[in-house]
Each structure stands twice: as C-alpha cells, then as structure tokens.
Image (spheres, rainbow, N blue to C red):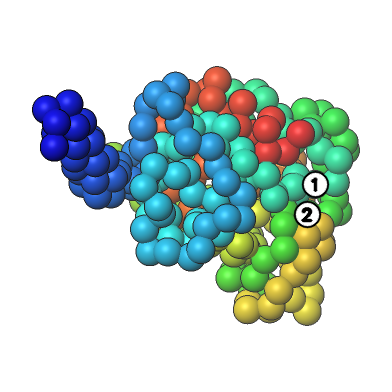
Amino acid sequence: MSKFNALLTCTAAIAALGVLFFSNLFFPLWTWTSGGPVAGEGLPQVAQGTHPPSAEPAGGDAPSPEDLPFFAGNINSLPRETIVELLAFLDTPIANARINMTAGQLPGAPRPYRNGIHEGIDFYDGFSGVPIIQGTPVLAAAEGKIIRIDHAYQEMTPAQADEFRRISAESLDTPADILDKFRGRQVWLEHQGEVITRYAHLETVEAGLVEGQIVSAGQQIGTVGNSGTSQAVAGRRGGRHLHFEVWLKGYYLGEGLPLEDIRFILRGIFE
Ligand SMILES: [Zn+2]
C-alpha cells in the first residue's frame, strides 16, 4: 500500500467514525422533549405522514401529526411554523368566526379576579366578525371523541363564587378545581394525536351526546353562554362568549409564548 493510499484509508476511517459518533450519540439526545433546537439552526422540515409510529421521534426530525401521541414535550417549545402545521386540522369552533387578536382575550392574558392566567381564546360578539349571541352554535373544531360533556351543570351561588375568588387571591395561581368552576359548563374533545379542545361557558350542551361518542368536524356540541362568569352567578345574561382552549400533554397552546408568536400561530391554524 502506498503512503498516499494509507493516508486516504485512514482519513476515510476517521470520517466514518465521526458520522457514527454523531448519528448514534448526538441525535438521540437532540430530541424535541428537551425543547428542540433554536429556530434558524438548520431546522429539519416536518415530513407529513412519513413517520412510522415510534416511541421516540427519529433524531432531528420534527414530529408529524402521526407522532403526536408519542410527543411528550411542551408543544409550545416547537418552532411556531411547526405548531401551525401540527394543529392545522383544527377549525374555528364558531362558524366563520375570526380569531379575536385582542391581547386580553388570548392565552397568557392576566386574570386578576382569580389571580391567574387566561389559558384560551375568547370569541365575543363584536370581535369575531359574526354575531355571537344566545343560541349561537358551538362546533367541534375537528373530529374527536367526547371526553367530557356537562349535562348536569349547576351554576355557582354568589357565596361560592366569592369563596373561590378569595381562595384564588390567597394562592399563587388559580387552583385547578376552582378554575374549572370558572369555566362553567363545558365540553372537552380528544382529537388525533391526543390533542384536546375545551369549550367553556356554554349555555347548553347537545342533548343525546355522551362521553366516549365520536363527533365529526363542525358538528354542533352546544351553544354559547356565560356559565361560570360573574354575570351568570348574578343571574344576568350579559358577558356571553365562547372560551376555547387547545391542549397537548398538559400544556395549553400559547403557554409561555410571546403575544407575537401566539397571534402568528392562531392565524396560521385558523385563518
Ligand atoms: Zn376566556
């Protein structure tokens, strides 16, 4: 073997070892569960429908909708374009309604009355491009399984509501059981990839629908109301709106994100 050939073989072997090292050691650590790479650093593109189900997404690939059941991290840690792509199957829960981009009605808005943070998107009359009034149908944002439907809802009494606000004020955040009361009458749906949507403050839920049942995209599940709000507690009819949340693996869509990103993501998904 000539000196030149020996050098070439040696270089090739070192290069091969390098490739092995990085593919076997580096990429398995570089998972989305740890928050993923920083935007702009050679991000892999989402490959739709090309991933076999796997407990761990293949190294370096963004999860496709098929991977979502196995995605254990915070969806908000993904690049915002990826979030849009993953949730693009969702539609607005009120026919032809626009997403209201008012900061106070988006995820992350402070809610001083209960010492907490808003976890959803509000659809109010006058802000969404369509009338949102008594009887306005609330629609399933996508095909999904009913995992909660409050047929036997009881409004809080004024004394109970006062007590819940007092407890919240003394806590670091709104306690989960109290927050649930403030959401009023609800329907929760589970969709593909374990994505969950919640519809709150409903006045009615559709008779005949039961937990475990599959509803189709756009099927009516209830009507807009004000249940769980101070107006309802006081026996008044004002303040009707739909409060709508999107969840994955214990994180709500928009949790911890800047307003700018939240608006980008919601426009991308729903418009
Ligand atoms: Zn709300």
Report x, y in % for residue 29.
Answer: 25, 45
Q: Is mark 2 within 8 Å of ligand 1?
A: no
Indicate the amino acid at tag 2: Val
* Residue 228 visible from this viewpoint: no
Q: Which residue is mark 1?
A: 94
Gap between marks 2 and 1, in whole Å? 5 Å
Query: Element at badge 2?
Result: strand
Report x, y in % for residue 119.
Answer: 51, 41
- Residue pictured at 11% horizontal, 27% vertical: 3
Nearest the eye: 233 or 68: 68
Q: Which comes sooner in the sequence, label 2 or label 1?
A: 1
Nearest the eye: 29 or 128: 29
Please identify the quadrant where the C terminus is shown.
Answer: top right
Q: Is residue 103 left or right of residue 165?
A: right
Bin the neighbour count of mark 2 within 10 Å (Cα to Cα): few under 14, some 14-19, many 20 and up: many
Nearest the eye: 249 or 193: 193
107 to 240, vertically: above or below: above
Q: Are marks 2 and 1 in contact (CB under 8 Å)?
A: yes
211 to 155, vertically: above or below: below
Report x, y in % for residue 240.
Answer: 73, 43
- Residue pictured at 53% horizontal, 37% vertical: 45
Mark number for residue 209?
none
- Residue pictured at 40% horizontal, 52% vertical: 58
Mark number for residue 138?
2
Bin the neighbour count of mark 1 within 10 Å (Cα to Cα): few under 14, some 14-19, many 20 and up: many
Please identify the quadrant where the N terminus is shown.
Answer: top left
- Residue pictured at 57% horizontal, 46% vertical: 47
Indicate the amino acid at tag 1: Ile
Q: Is residue 76 left or right of residue 209?
A: left
Q: Is residue 232 left or right of residue 66?
A: right
Residue situated furthest front in the rendering: 2
Report x, y in % for residue 77.
Answer: 41, 37
